[in-house]
Image (spheres, rainbow, N blue to C red):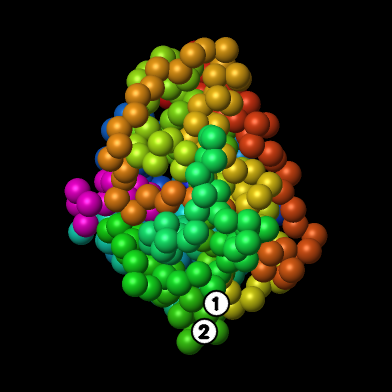
Amino acid sequence: MNIAIVTGSAGLIGSESVAFLSDKFDLIVGIDNNLRQYFFGKDGNTEWNRNRIENLYSNYRHYSADIREVSQLEPIFKEYGTDIKLVVHTAAQPSHDWAAKEPFTDFGVNATGTLNMLELTRLHAPEAVFIFTSTNKVYGDNPNYLPLVELETRWEIDENHPYFENGIDEHHSIDHTKHSVFGASKVAADIMVQEYGRYFGMKTGIFRGGCLTGPNHSGAQLHGFLAYLMKCAITGTHYTIFGYKGKQVRDNIHSHDLVNMFWHFYQNPRPGEVYNAGGGRFANCSMLEAITLCEKITGNKMNYSYTDTNRIGDHIWYISDLSKFKSHYPDWNWEYGLEETLVQIHDGIAARLAGKTV
């Protein structure tokens, strides 16, 4: 039997992984205890998504285990053993704002939880491919010291800089920088996943995501930039722009495109390899540009205000360079552009609001 384990299976990337992999494995084992509701309140509740995937995929089996607790994880690994061929580890505390409130919890989930998953995979399914969703926050605020130019609706990097053509690559330093507490816990996990690949020879892959997005994002104020922005555009909820004149730039990758990167890696793994994973030059926007798109799609004028105080560790300009991944896996490419993704997000949120399941 071929089994895939997906942690954070009711979240955006986890649920996309379940959908993508359901016809490629005999059984999909999901691990998710809805900690997002604890982190973000009712806006972060992923119960609706768990119910959705349980109804859609007959070969999906759910476990409400806490990844911080080996005692809850080990029975799962003992039950399935070497039938486990793939582990997609997406479970995380994903907000750098929230992390500062409870550093123990943040580190427990992001760092200790990752170590638990790695070690149990090594002990019970050492030949499995292990995929980790890291973050561009491992680079801290180093990108803010690049030579940036202010344009009418966005910040942009100087066109003479090597990053101008394709974005920031994996050689960008993760040292001598302010990461945020969240960024530091993800650095610890990122390095540990690399080490299990290099030291133990496990088939580990690290994907440093830009803004991960898609129609199945719950959209909470502290997590899910485009989903929460679209929810505010639909409902008229007030939105606050924090600093940088609203011109801060994010690249955005659709959850399907990211999971398709995972699939390509699984088929030909490169142990301990690190890849930047975002929308790159293909799909990116500033806050102001995203607001304009949301207003266009909804037909509503957004209710927003601006404060000069930026979030600690926030990037002014970040675009991922995916050249390395595309050179290793030339058959992969983006499928969903920014506006198409936003339309999907709109339709998903509108449907859930109508059904009162958000």
Query: Which residue has dot 1 on it?
Result: 272
Give, as a three-letter code, the residue at label 2. Arg
Residue drawn at x 73%, y 44% as measured from the top left: 335
Q: Nearer the viewer, residue 284 or 90?
A: 284
Residue occupied by mark 2: 198
Residue 117's x, y, as percent?
42, 66
- Residue found farthest to the bottom: 199
> Where's residue 184, x and y in %?
32, 64
Q: Is residue 278 above or below residue 83?
A: above
Q: For mark 2, give the secondary structure.
A: helix
State the residue lying farthest toward the right. 331
Per the model, the C-alpha gap separating discs 2 and 1 is 6 Å
The answer to if 293 sits in the magenta stretch is no
What amino acid type is highlighted by mark number 1?
A: Gly
Which residue shows up at 35% across the image and 24% down it? Answer: 305
Q: Residue at x 27, y 46 (%)?
A: 98
Q: Are marks 2 and 1 in contact (CB under 8 Å)?
A: yes
Does residue 64 lie above or below 332 as drawn? above
Secondary structure, mark 1, is: loop
* 2 displayed left or right of 50: right
Foreground: 341 or 180?
A: 180
Q: Residue 38 vs residue 253: left or right?
A: left
Using the image as rendered, state which of residue 268 and residue 345 is in the foreground: 345
Residue 101 appears in the picture as rendered: yes
Would you call the spot at circle 1 few (<14 residues within 10 Å), some (14-19), or many (20 or more)? many
* The C terminus sits in image quarter: top left
Q: Is residue 202 left or right of residue 281?
A: left
Query: In the image, which residues are magenta?
Result: 92-103
First along the sequence among labels 2 and 1: 2
Tell me where residue 83 sits by quadrant: bottom right
Specify the quadrant that holds the N terminus. Answer: bottom right
